[in-house]
Amino acid sequence: MEPLEHDSASTRLGTAAELLGYLAVAPLLVCFAAVAALPEYPQRELAQRAAVAWGAVLLTFSGAVHFGLALAGRAPAGAARLAAAVLPGVIAAAAVIIGGQRALALLTVGWGVFWLYEHRVIGAALPAAYLSLRRNLSLAACTLLALTMIACDSAGLL
């Protein structure tokens, strides 16, 4: 098993992969704008639920990438590493269950902690281009989820 950092494709992810990564965060921007701008409470509440759901899906996907790498034999598959890959899904499920501003806060923390894990714990085994993209996407997700939480507070949503 050769580490990912030695892959020939590790120097650049490719424009399509990067574009899709950034497009995946766009619904969080739409949800934030909807919570902040829609006139009626039920519409804002739906936008809040959509932000929680989409933030949870993206967080789960981030962990699933590592789980897939371990299953494919492209990354070490120790128990701690597999648990760390599954934990984002557990956090996401908890957020969906609790809902509201608390869910947005939990997702924001989950994104931040997983970013720290990727960069501080296993960063040496991951391609620099991947880490750069993940940093940008994590920052965007954290920022948009936090802004949505603030907008929800201003809109009177719990």
Image (cartoon, rainbow, N blue to C red):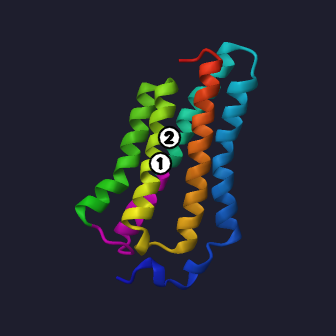
Q: Residue at coordinates 66% horizontally, 64% vertically from top-left?
A: 18
- The quarter holding residue 21 reads bottom right
Residue 123 magenta-highlighted: no
Residue that carries the numbered disc 1 in the rendered image: 112
- From the top left corner, tell me how far across and down residue 153 is, in percent: 59, 20
- From the top left corner, tell me how far across and down residue 83 is, in percent: 29, 54
- From the top left corner, tell me how far across and down residue 132 is, in percent: 58, 66
Left/right placement of residue 9 relative to residue 32 reads left
* Looking at the image, residue 16 lies above or below residue 34: below
* Looking at the image, residue 70 lies above or below residue 30: below
The three-letter amino acid code for the residue at tag 1 is Gly
Residue that carries the numbered disc 2 in the rendered image: 108
State the extent of the magenta-drawn residues as a range: 61-77
Q: In the rendering, which numbered label is found on residue 53?
A: none
Left/right placement of residue 1 relative to residue 10 reads left
- From the top left corner, tell me how far across and down residue 139 is, in percent: 58, 51
- SS class of the residue under badge 1? helix
- SS class of the residue under badge 2? helix
Q: Residue at coordinates 51% horizontally, 24% vertically from top-left?
A: 100
The three-letter amino acid code for the residue at tag 2 is Thr
For disc 2, the neighbor class at 10 Å (few under 14, some 14 to 19, many from 20) is many
Is 155 in front, or is 57?
155
- The quarter holding residue 48 reads top right
